[in-house]
């Protein structure tokens, strides 16, 4: 069985104090008996603080973005090897906010994915449709195109060491969660696309759902056969909510 992952995407929130307090409260709330991997992705500037706080815990550390170049004249940017140096094991690539606001198109996302893996990071590849695209009935097409851009660049083998997150744009930060059935249908499509290249890799791939996940709706979502945990925004900033989501993932029958 695939071990679920619950990942916190803090987005552009926090402070040094919040980083210390939130991580310490989450760590205290987690139960060793739960079968779940927990990942925290703070803003770049708090990764080091988080890394110190996480020492000795089982919580994994990730970043929200990277620049695909190995180094050099890229003012303001952060490379994959810098993230590894700070103790990161994961990095989010292709989040819809970056796709919509910072020009991360499919080519950029694929380059970021490849650069992350080359440095030893596990990319968490986000895909998802807008409300308009869902209403046009092209959800599967949009998601498959986003995924195919990375498959073409990196090959299916790369997905043995990656995580996919399905995040419908209309469900992010809106309080409108996809129903478990809506999410399951897209997760099945994603796994099916990968299975077209390798059944084994598809069967092992963790596919997370993101978009207004809360303690109260997590169990129903994570109970679906192709949903292997969540990528959590707003609710990851509240320790009790985030821990409740981890509990839902970690105590599935
Ligand atoms: P919310 O949980 O706030 O809807 O955000 C989801 C998300 O974008 C996580 O990456």
Image: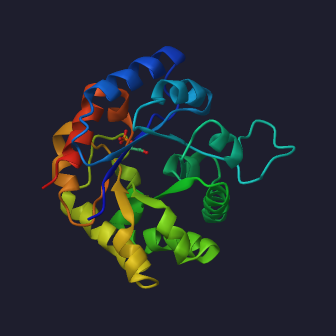
Left/right placement of residue 79 relative to residue 20 reads right
User: On the image, which quarter does residue 131 sit in?
Assistant: bottom left
Residue found 64% across the figure and 73% down from its top: 153
Judge whether 145 appears above or below 207 on screen: below
Left/right placement of residue 160 relative to residue 168 reads right
Q: Residue furthest front?
A: 56
Residue found 49% across the figure and 61% down from its top: 162
**Residue 248 visible (yes or no):** yes
Q: Position of residue 121 (x, y in %)?
A: 58, 53
Q: Position of residue 206 (x, y in %)?
A: 37, 61
Q: Nearer the viewer, residue 108 or 91?
A: 91
Give the colouring mode of the picture.
rainbow
Q: Residue furthest right?
A: 73
Judge whether 96 appears above or below 40 on screen: below
Q: Position of residue 197 (x, y in %)?
A: 46, 84
Q: Quadrant of the C terminus?
A: bottom left
Q: Residue furthest top?
A: 17
Q: Quadrant of the N terminus?
A: bottom left
Q: Position of residue 250 (x, y in %)?
A: 23, 47
Judge whether 21 appears above or below 210 on screen: above
Residue found 53% across the figure and 25% down from its top: 52
Residue found 35% across the figure and 64% down from its top: 134
**Residue 238 visible (yes or no):** no
Q: Nearer the viewer, residue 173 or 88?
A: 88
Q: Nearer the viewer, residue 137 or 51?
A: 51
């Amino acid at each position: 069985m695939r071990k679920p992952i619950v990942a916190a995407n803090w987005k552009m929130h926090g402070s040094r104090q919040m980083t210390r307090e939130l991580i310490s409260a989450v760590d205290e709330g987690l139960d060793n008996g739960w079968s779940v991997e927990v990942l925290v992705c703070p803003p770049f500037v708090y990764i080091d603080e988080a890394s110190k706080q996480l020492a000795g815990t089982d919580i994994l550390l990730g970043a929200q973005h990277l620049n695909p170049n190995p180094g050099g004249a890229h003012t303001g940017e952060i490379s994959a090897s810098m993230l590894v140096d700070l103790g990161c094991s994961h990095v989010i690539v292709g989040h819809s906010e970056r796709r919509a606001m910072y020009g991360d198109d499919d080519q950029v996302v694929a380059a970021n994915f490849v650069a992350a893996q080359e440095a030893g990071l596990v990319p968490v590849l986000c895909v998802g449709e807008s409300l308009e695209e869902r209403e046009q009935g092209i959800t599967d097409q949009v998601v498959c195109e986003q995924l195919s851009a990375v498959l073409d660049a990196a090959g299916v083998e790369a997905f043995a060491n990656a995580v996919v997150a399905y995040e419908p744009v209309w469900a992010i930060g809106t309080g409108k969660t996809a129903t478990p059935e809506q999410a399951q249908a897209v997760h099945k499509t994603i796994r099916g696309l990968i299975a077209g290249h390798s059944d084994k890799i598809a069967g092992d791939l963790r596919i997370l759902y993101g978009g207004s996940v809360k303690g109260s709706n997590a169990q129903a979502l994570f109970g679906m056969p192709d949903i292997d945990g969540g990528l959590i925004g707003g609710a990851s900033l509240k320790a009790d909510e985030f821990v409740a989501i981890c509990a839902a993932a970690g105590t599935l029958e």
